[in-house]
């Protein structure tokens, strides 16, 4: 976490975010799990917030967390690991017990593989879709993304409890519930947003097991608060 000079003294923790981003939404769940208060700054709704967040973090992505003392950290996974270490007395995001840790880390990595592949192919690299190599690249990438989604569906289908870890709600649940929402709502958002339409057109399939698992958590107060 870097320290950035500030023109004013910060009195409130700040999270720069995008309302629909699964990476920002899971960070909001992580902060709520830790019982931390924060001010939300939507970089899509306010261009000046986007400029400020990019000035603060060299990653130039969202979310970006600014602590009360002005220290800055980007990347949702890095932020979550930092929160576990900075606030150890609050409920853990990442379990320490080996079996729970294995399940949580595996699931989180599968979520990130699927999300990053879909986001990269449908947004960052979509301008190359007219290339002769596009179909081969797309097929290989989407096969990996679909394998990850199918593996996630299989993992949750055999659970005998609502949460991934035996110890309860963890980062893995936050990663998965926000990913499922992002993918499930993409078709209805696609007509209004060209980039979302590109993402939706890639041919991935959301396993129904993931939606059934997510149904158990939709009425959680912290999930409802995401809007």
Image: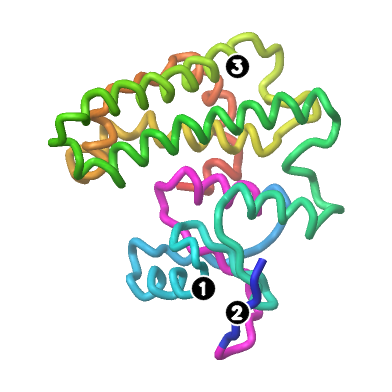
Kind of element beneath mark 2: loop
Please give the label number shown on residue 56: 1
Nearer the observer: mark 1 or 3; the answer is: 1
Kind of element beneath mark 1: helix
Mark 1, Cα crowd under 10 Å, few <14 / some 14-19 / many 20+, is many
Q: CA distance from mark 1 to mark 3?
A: 38 Å
Give the answer, above or below, for where 102 lies relative to 74: above
Residue at 17% across / 38% down in the picture?
191
Q: Looking at the image, is mark 1 or mark 3 earlier in the sequence?
A: 1
The residue identified by callout 2 is 4
Mark 2 touches mark 1? (CB < 8 Å)? yes
Instruction: Indicate left or right for 137 with 170 as reference.
Output: left
Kind of element beneath mark 3: helix
Mark 1 touches mark 3? (CB < 8 Å)? no
**Colour setting:** rainbow
- Region in magenta: 7-31
Q: Is residue 3 visible?
A: yes
User: Residue 181 occupies which quadrant of the picture?
Assistant: top left
Residue at 55% across / 54% down in the picture?
75
Q: CA distance from mark 3 to mark 2?
A: 41 Å
Give the answer, above or below, for where 25 lies relative to 60: above
Instruction: Indicate left or right for 44 with 71 as reference.
Output: left
Q: CA distance from mark 2 to mark 1?
A: 7 Å
The residue identified by callout 3 is 156
Q: Looking at the image, is mark 3 or mark 2 earlier in the sequence?
A: 2
Mark 3, Cα crowd under 10 Å, few <14 / some 14-19 / many 20+, is some
């Amino acid at each position: 976490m870097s320290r950035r000079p500030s023109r004013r003294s910060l009195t409130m923790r700040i999270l720069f975010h995008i309302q629909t981003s699964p990476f920002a939404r899971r960070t909001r769940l992580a902060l709520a799990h830790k019982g931390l208060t924060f001010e939300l700054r939507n970089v899509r709704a306010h261009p000046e917030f986007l400029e400020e967040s990019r000035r603060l973090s060299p990653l130039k992505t969202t979310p970006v967390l600014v602590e009360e003392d002005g220290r800055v950290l980007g990347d949702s996974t890095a932020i979550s690991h930092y929160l576990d270490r900075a606030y150890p007395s609050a409920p853990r995001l990442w379990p320490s017990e080996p079996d729970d840790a294995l399940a949580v880390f595996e699931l989180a990595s599968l979520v990130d593989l699927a999300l990053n592949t879909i986001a990269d192919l449908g947004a960052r690299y979509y301008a190359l879709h007219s290339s002769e190599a596009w179909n081969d690249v797309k097929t290989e990438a989407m096969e990996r993304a679909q394998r990850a989604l199918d593996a996630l569906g299989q993992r949750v289908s055999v659970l005998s409890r609502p949460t991934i870890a035996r110890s309860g709600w963890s980062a893995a649940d936050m990663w998965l519930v926000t990913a499922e929402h992002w993918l499930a709502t993409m078709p209805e958002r696609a007509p209004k947003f060209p980039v979302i339409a590109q993402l939706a057109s890639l041919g991935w399939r959301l396993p129904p097991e993931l939606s059934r698992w997510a149904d158990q958590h939709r009425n959680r107060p912290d999930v409802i608060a995401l809007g």
